[in-house]
Amino acid sequence: MRAAYLTLGCKLNFAETASLQDALAREGARPVREGEKADLCVVNTCSVTDVADRKCRQAIRRMVREHPGAFVVVMGCYAQLHPDLLAGLDGVDLVVGMEQKGDVVRYVKERMARRALPGQQPAAACHEAIAVPTRDIRTFVPSCSRGDRTRYFLKVQDGCNYYCTYCTIPMARGRSRNGSVASLVAQAEEVARAGGREIVLTGVNIGDFGRSTGETFYDLVRALDGVEGIARYRISSIEPDLLTDEVIDFCAASRAFMPHFHIPLQSGSDEVLRLMRRHYGTDLFAEKVRRVCDVMPDAFIGVDVIVGMRGERPELFEESYRFIESLPVAQLHVFSYSERPGTRALAIPHVVCATERHERSQRLIALSEQKRKAFYARHRGAVRPVLWEHAKDGHPFHGFTDNYIRVTLPVGQTVEDNAITPVRLGDFAADGESLVGIPV
Ligand code: SF4
């Protein structure tokens, strides 16, 4: 059987698709090659914005068109939120909700076997949806995906109990739950045996780790740090109120946790944070950033920001901008607020128009560029270890330092990919996106 996969959205979705791909490969389904027709198509969807929803519908239609007659399965956040809508699309056979995502292989085998009964006509699409209400989602489905030859994404947690007013993720992924420390250490050991050097811990609300096993995120990072063969861990994103001083201090002194944090702020205005029902104010955020900088002065700190949230009046955006400008962080990930059906934010009266949202977003993107370049420039001349990634033919080798500076090797120089070697950081490379690394 030949299977085609298409994943939209976050790293968690990619990790889950990869695990499903492995499970289907054990049943004899190999990925389609360029130009081949698939017997089975899997689309793993995202529903973070209305644009994401639209892209998912387009992706499903494209799969149906490119692989006529294939059995088409749709899973992911959009599938959980609107199973019947997606099941009704032309060519869709099966829509699987979050609670059932661990059973996809069984469903596919049963239904494809039925389709192939002797003497049967090629089947019309089944249009079947299997999903339970989100409040009944309990299962943690383990997943680990290989991003490229060097980096793996290990899902440690799923779901979220926070219910920020703009967010649909808890409605799609259910309540917070996690794998046990022991099971995740076992997965990390497997990655090490497969030659992986770096693991990115992924989840929806990672800092909430331990709800379903009575453990803590601190227990997890301590245990993972001891896994031999894994040289680097990064934490994909952690809520500021859950980033404890204990975890920060442990990472600073640890063997393999990198000086790299990604902390969602969302707004630098306390009033907007209250409208968002975030669990902290700007004081706490600034204190966490300070703590990281105190114990890891070279740490790369990335920050998520949402612009144009309902209620973000112009003066509140200016306040937010000034706060963000004052933070010693290296990069901003800027998202424009998107109205999502079913969210409490829709009851907030002040609406920011699309043009204004775009302008605010552009200003923060420009600020992010300034901050990133300043962070890179501050490290020129320093010697730092780089984990080299596989270079495509004709392209220079590149990799990332421990503190997440992208480094390019001078043209013509080679290095073993998946190796970690020290370089002296030089000038900005021609792409402006990385520093040139001189091997030492
Ligand atoms: S913490 Fe807030 S933004 Fe993040 S997933 Fe949970 S509800 Fe959504």
Image: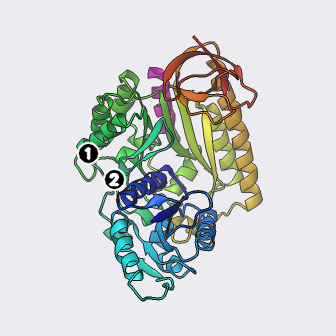
Outermost top residue? 440
Please state which of residues 77 and 300 is positioned toward the viewer in this rendering: 77
Tag 1: amino acid: Ser
Q: Which element type, helix, strand or loop, lies under badge 2?
A: loop
Using the rendered view, name the quadrant where residue 390 is placed. Answer: top right
Residue 79 point in image, percent of width and height: 48, 70
Q: What residue type is labelled 2?
A: Pro
Viewer can see residue 216: no
Taking the spot 53% from the left edge, 28% from the top edge, the residue there is 417
Q: Position of residue 269 (x, y in %)?
A: 59, 46
Q: What number is the disc on residue 162?
A: none
Up/down of 164 relative to 151, above or below: below
Q: Height in image: 375 above or below 204?
A: above
Separation of residues labelled 1 and 2 (CA atoms): 9 Å
**Mark 2 residue crowding within 10 angstroms, few (<14) / some (14–19) / many (20+):** some
Kindly indicate whether the residue at mark 2 contacts the one at mark 1 (C-beta within 8 angstroms): yes
Q: How crowded is mark 1: few (under 14 residues within 10 Å), some or many (20 or more)?
A: few
Question: Which stretch is magenta?
Answer: 285-298
Question: For mark 2, what is the residue?
Answer: 142
* Residue at 29% across, 50% down: 179
Question: Is 92 situated above or below 149?
Answer: below
Q: Nearer the viewer, residue 190 or 15?
A: 190
Task: Give the overall secondary structure of the magenta segment.
Answer: helix
Label annotation for residue 183: 1
Q: Is residue 382 visible?
A: yes
Provide the secondary structure element on which disc 1 rests: helix
Tell me residue 313's x, y (percent).
68, 55
